[in-house]
């Protein structure tokens, strides 16, 4: 190992500093004294007395030295004491600027330079410590406002004269720190703007309340802190903007997902949506070959018209073909069996803007059509109800007049006949209305009675029409007497039934009432009776209504049957489907039995069917007598 030789002259500066200082503690006891300073002050290399003042012979020098030492301790600043006796200046400065109990004395200016270097180093350390602390506060704080409040507390400590320093940070009109910078008149100000994205957001303000100059390093410190705060604000604003953008993106993403579920044309999103969509969706090529679909039964091969509708050829007015041709969405409605579908085709463009595939959605709209037709039927029935109510009113007025007059005529004949009896004795050939009196007397009571019966029947028909036209809210709140409901319904349908068949009415003696809707039940009875009558061809058949009550199950039972042509199994399975009808050529809509089925279900009941071709059909309705729960 090579040893490096050390030359004493390399350390002349350090040795000169050490030999020319005198150090005293808080008790003014000499802690250390260099050889050179002992010679300069006391002309001796010998050890000094314990207390520094005892080494000076003159009282005046002792007093001056004592005052200077206390001044340095108090102000923490370097001071100079002129010794005229020695023709030298004595430089005094604190051993530590933060803790100035120890005082250093020297007779050479080089010592001041060394002390200044040490002082400057300490100042730089303070500044670096301030920068580090403020940086740590800003970096670690969750809230920038809290960090600024804490940071300003450290700022004043970084300056030369912290005791007369005031520091303030202002951001967006909010002040952090010592407002005395604004309220009191300062001797010197150091003001640096906080610039964020080219705009002034605030400032860092440091004030000396005494006349002192700011060091260049202190100016740099304030500038760096202003830049640091600006960067923190910029970061915070960027984070807020990022968070806002994130929320915006999340909202847009959510909206995009919703739109994707309805309209997305891409393969990736279609695959994610397919399992949740009940409609049949296929992506097809120009030759109608299926590229992908959302139903296992359809798969991803074969022609669309074969897989969806079991057809041999493409659909008439095919929307996919139209979308390929015009490059725009197209749609049609299509019948297939007893169902109705809506086909919608959307073009999928390639990078060249050409249509190379089409996304086709097949949606079953049978129920929608059913509801629309039901609504239309409701409107028609409402209009018919108004018309019926008006007709009933017009019939009822003259019928009331006729009924009243007939009663008078009936009573009048009771008085007239005795008079006529006496007259016929005097005039045996008496004729009234070209009839012999005996025939007249025998038949006139019968004629009057028939007129009374006729007007009573008109009144019952009018009452039935009024009841039919009565506004209904659709609630299941009526106490329905099924026997009375059947009788009332027959006033309106019996004539139509008797055109086709005999009528047989079998009503049970004691059938309890149930909670329901009378008008809806009348509609069911009317549909079943008309259907039963129309099922009988060539006349001569029989239609019957039978009521009863099952005590065990607490059910009211209504049977409506005929001995007409009956139905095969295929027809029986479809009889309650909307739009299914075997009488479309005669104006049938296929809604009557479908609506009736819905009404019975609404009453928490059930409807059963027994039928056989050539034998006839019987519908059995079972409705519980317990009040049904309202949905």
Image (cartoon, rainbow, N blue to C red):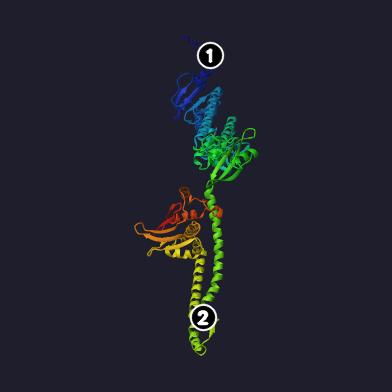
Residue that extends furthest to the top in the rendered view of this protein? 2
State how far apart marks 2 and 1 are (Cα).
161 Å
Screen quadrant of the C terminus: bottom left
Q: Local crowd at mark 2 within 10 Å, few (<14), some, or many (≥20)? A: some
State which mark lies toward you, 2 or 1: 2
In what element is the residue under mark 1? helix
Residue 207 lies, in percent from the top left, at 58, 38
Image: 555 above or below 85: below
- Whether residue 167 can be seen here: no
User: Residue 448 or 232: which is nearer the viewer?
Assistant: 448
Q: Quadrant of residue 175?
A: top right
In what element is the residue under mark 2? helix
| Disc with the residue nearer the chain's start (2 vs 1) | 1
Q: Local crowd at mark 1 within 10 Å, few (<14), some, or many (≥20)? A: few
User: Residue 240 or 593: which is nearer the viewer?
Assistant: 593
Residue 489 lies, in percent from the top left, at 47, 63
User: Residue 381 or 427: which is nearer the viewer?
Assistant: 427
Residue 418 lies, in percent from the top left, at 48, 86
Please name the residue shown 47% across and 64% down the image.
490
Q: Name the residue under label 1.
A: 9
Please name the residue shown 53% across and 18% down the image.
13
Image: 359 above or below 398: above
The reply to whether the C-beta atoms of the residues labelled 2 and 1 are less than 8 Å apart is no
Image: 341 above or below 289: below
Residue that extends furthest to the left in the rendered view of this protein? 552
Question: Residue 409, which numbered label?
Answer: 2
Question: Residue 349, which numbered label?
Answer: none
Residue 259 lies, in percent from the top left, at 56, 42
């Amino acid at each position: 190992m090579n040893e490096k030789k050390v030359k004493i002259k390399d350390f002349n500066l350090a040795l000169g500093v050490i030999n020319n200082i005198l150090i005293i503690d808080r008790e003014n006891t000499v802690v250390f004294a260099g050889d050179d300073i002992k010679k300069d002050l006391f002309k001796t290399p010998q050890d000094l007395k314990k207390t520094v003042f005892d080494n000076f012979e003159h009282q005046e020098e002792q007093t001056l030295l004592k005052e200077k030492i206390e001044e340095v301790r108090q102000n923490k600043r370097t001071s100079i004491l002129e010794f005229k006796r020695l023709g030298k200046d004595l430089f005094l400065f604190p051993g530590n600027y933060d803790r100035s109990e120890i005082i250093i004395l020297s007779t050479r200016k080089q010592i001041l330079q060394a002390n200044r270097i040490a002082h400057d180093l300490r100042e730089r350390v303070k500044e670096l410590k301030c920068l580090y602390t403020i940086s740590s506060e800003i970096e670690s704080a969750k809230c920038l406002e809290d960090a600024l409040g804490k940071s300003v507390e450290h700022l004043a400590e970084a300056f030369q004269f912290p005791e007369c320093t005031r520091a303030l940070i202002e951001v967006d009109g909010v002040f952090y720190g010592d407002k005395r910078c604004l309220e009191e008149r300062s001797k010197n100000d150091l003001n640096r703007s906080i610039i964020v994205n080219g705009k002034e957001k605030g400032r860092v303000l440091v004030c000396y309340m005494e006349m002192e100059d700011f060091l260049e390093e202190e100016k740099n410190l304030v500038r760096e802190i202003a830049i640091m705060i600006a960067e923190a604000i910029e970061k915070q604003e960027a984070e807020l903007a990022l968070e806002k953008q994130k929320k915006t993106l999340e909202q847009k993403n959510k909206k995009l997902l919703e739109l994707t579920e309805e309209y997305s044309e891409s393969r990736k999103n279609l695959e994610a949506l397919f399992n949740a969509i009940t409609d049949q969706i296929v992506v097809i090529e120009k030759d109608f070959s299926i590229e992908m679909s959302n139903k296992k039964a359809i798969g991803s091969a074969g022609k669309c018209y074969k897989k969806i509708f079991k057809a041999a050829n493409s659909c008439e007015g095919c929307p996919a073909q139209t979308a390929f041709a015009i490059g725009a969405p197209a749609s049609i409605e299509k019948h297939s069996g007893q169902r109705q579908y809506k086909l919608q085709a959307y073009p999928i463009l390639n990078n060249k803007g050409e249509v190379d595939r089409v996304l086709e959605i097949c949606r079953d709209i049978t129920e929608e059509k059913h509801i629309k037709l039901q609504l239309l039927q409701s409107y028609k029935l409402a209009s018919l109800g108004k018309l019926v109510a008006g007709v009933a009113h017009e019939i009822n007025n003259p019928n009331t007049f006729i009924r009243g007059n007939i009663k008078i005529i009936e009573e009048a004949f009771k008085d007239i006949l005795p008079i006529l009896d006496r007259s016929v004795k005097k005039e045996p050939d008496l004729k009234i209305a070209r009839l012999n009196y005996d025939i007249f007397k025998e038949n006139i009571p019968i004629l009057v009675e028939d007129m009374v019966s006729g007007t009573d029947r008109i009144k019952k028909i009018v009452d039935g029409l009024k009841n039919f036209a009565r506004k209904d809210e659709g609630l299941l709140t009526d106490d329905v007497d099924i026997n009375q409901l059947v009788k009332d319904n027959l006033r309106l349908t019996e004539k139509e039934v008797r055109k086709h068949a005999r009528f047989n009415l079998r009503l049970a003696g004691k059938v309890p009432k149930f909670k329901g809707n009378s008008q809806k039940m009348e509609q069911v009875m009317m549909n079943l009776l008309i259907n039963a009558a129309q099922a009988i061809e060539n006349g001569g058949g029989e239609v019957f209504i039978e009521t009863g009550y099952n005590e065990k199950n607490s059910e009211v039972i209504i049977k409506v049957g005929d001995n007409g042509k009956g139905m095969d199994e295929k027809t029986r399975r479809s009889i309650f489907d909307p739009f299914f009808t075997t009488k479309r050529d005669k104006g049938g809509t296929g809604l009557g039995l479908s609506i009736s089925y819905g009404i019975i279900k609404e009453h928490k009941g059930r409807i059963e069917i027994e039928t056989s071709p050539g034998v006839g059909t019987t519908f059995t309705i079972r409705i519980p007598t317990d009040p049904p729960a309202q949905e």
